[in-house]
Structures are given as structure tokens and as C-alpha cells.
Image: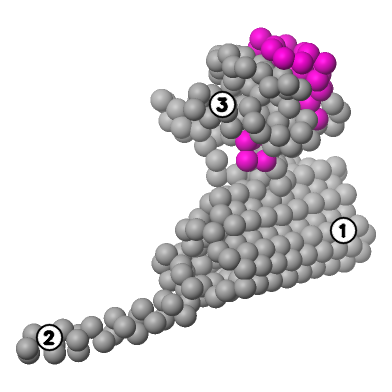
Amino acid sequence: MNFLHPISVKTIAEKIGATLLGDESLEATGINEIHQVRPGDITFSDVKKYFEKALKSAATIIILNEEATCPPGKALLLCENPFEAYDGLIREFRPFQPITQGVSTSAQIDTSTFIEPGAVIGHHVTIGKNCYIQSNAVISEYTIIGDNVVIQAGALIGTDAFYFKKTETGYQRWRSGGRVILENKVEIGAGCTINKGVSGDTIIGAGTKLDSQVHIGHDVVIGKNCLFAAQVGIGGNTTVGDNVVLYGQVGIAQNLKIGNNVVILAKSGVSKNLEDGKAYFGYPAGEAREIYRELAALRHLPEFFAGYYKK
């Protein structure tokens, strides 16, 4: 998530009541959780074994709950509860605004776009040329939609990330400060749900088409000209390449990378990265031709054992 204007690290330290170590001249240009950080970002860690990952990340400012050696060119902010500090900054700079009318006055919508009655367009949404938004679709805050995009009835674009911090008293929700970006010529089927990023962007690449009831998790990046059949589900922070075809009810776990020109056959479950240009099938998904050979061999097992016991 980017800030509207750079904010000095001293100001951030004052806001969260933190002790400042390192370069006091730095400015923050954004805030992101560790998977999405860029130079200029604030991030945090409240578990010591992950300190090194945060310190070696691209983040410029790191919020910690214990003192550590500050790398050159960075700043550390020490406070009692880094998660609360981080989440509080997100909530301050991306405050919750309930939708109180069908189309927010802060939305920017090209005059060539047609929106059916009953669709809801949230705050700070941008919609390009020649789009078609069907009734009962909901497009939530800060979503960016390109040109010639179709969103069918009942689709939910920009729902909150399914992202919680486990605490002693239960699960605590993160404020979702990210966005959804639909590039040109994307089509979203009826009843699809697309989570916005925790602090980054969920992106659907140009020309990609989603059938009905597809779910895309937070911070997922999908390439160009992909085709997903009904009831596909993709876990958070997974990257899918260009020209990928997912048949019905394919499930892909979080934090994976799916290569370009991949085909995954129906009802497959993906739990590891997949290479470019191959067809996959099964649970856990493997190369389709190998899985089919294994299934063919299994069908011959009764004959094999029948002959074995006759001996």
C-alpha cells in the first residue's frame, strides 16, 4: 500500500510510540507485509526467528519488539506490539468507509461504461472504457478496472483478505489495505469472489476469463489470457503465469508459482510449484501422462495378485 505522500520515520515513530534506531532521515513511501515489501516500505516482525528475514528484506523501515542490529540505510522502530502498530498505521492511512449509496461519489467511471441497476461501486474505484457491470455485482474500495471488462451478476470484487493473526484470545483480523486490479478485456463470471491484497495488489491479467463461482485469494497475481472454469479456487499470494487453463474445481494452495502455458485438469489439487508448458492432474497434482500411467498400472493389480496367489 502506498502513502499519498512520503512520511518521515520520526513521524511514524511518534505515531506508534516507538524507539527509533538507525537512519533518522528516512521517509516511508508505503507499508506492506513481508511478502510484498519494496524499498521505502514499512514492515514488521514480532517473532524473533523471522527478524533476519525482515531485516534482509527490501523494506526500509522495520517495526520490531526487540532490539536488533540495524542494517545500513534502514531504520528500526522498537515497540511492544509490532502487529498492533502496523495494523494501526494501515487503519489510519486507509480508514474504513462503509458504502452508503449504490455508486460512491469518489468513484471514477468512464461514461462509455454501462452499470446495471443494483450494482454497487465503492469508494475510490476506477473503471475504464466500455465495461459492463451486471446487477448485484459489488466492486469494493480502491479497485482498478481497465477497458472492455465484463463483470457478471453477483460477482464480488475486492472482498477483504482472509488473513488473521492468531493470538491467545483468538484470531485477530488485519485491515486489508490492498487493491484488486482487473486489466483490459478481463471477464469475471457470475458469483465470483476476488479478495483484495492484504497490503499489495491482487491482479487479474489482460484477457483472462473466469467462469462462475471462481475464488481468487489475496495478493494473487494471474497472468494474461488465462481461462479458469467454474469452482476453481486459488490460495493467497500465489502467482499464475500467462495462458494457463484451469478446469473445473481445481484447487491451488497459497504461496505457489504456476508457470506459463500450464493446463491443470478437473478436480486436481496443487500443493507445489508447477513448471511451464505441462499438463497436470490428480491430488496432489503431477504430470498428467505420468499419473495416467500410474492409474493404468493400478487397474492391472488385481490380475497380478490373482496370478501371484495361484502360484
Separation of marks 2 and 1 at Cα, in angstroms: 69 Å
Tag 2 and tag 1, C-beta contact below 8 Å = no
Residue that appears at 79% across and 51% down: 144
**Is residue 137 visible to the viewer in this orientation of the structure?**
no
* Circle 1 Cα neighbour tier, 10 Å, few/some/many (<14 / 14–19 / ≥20): some
Amino acid, disc 1? Gly
Q: Secondary structure at mark 2?
A: helix
| Residue displayed at 60% across by 44% down | 161
- Of all residues, the one furthest to the right in this rendering is 111
Label 3 packing within 10 angstroms: few (<14), some (14-19), many (20+) = some
In x, y percent, where is residue 121? 76, 51
Q: Residue at x 55, y 15 (%)?
A: 66
Q: Is residue 182 visible?
A: yes
x 62%, y 36%: residue? 34
As shown in the figure, which amino acid type bears the numbered disc 2? Tyr
> Dot 2 corresponds to which residue?
308
Label 1 element class: loop
Q: Nearer the viewer, mark 2 or mark 1?
A: 2
Q: Which residue in the structure is indicated by mark 1?
A: 128
Magenta region, residue range: 7-36
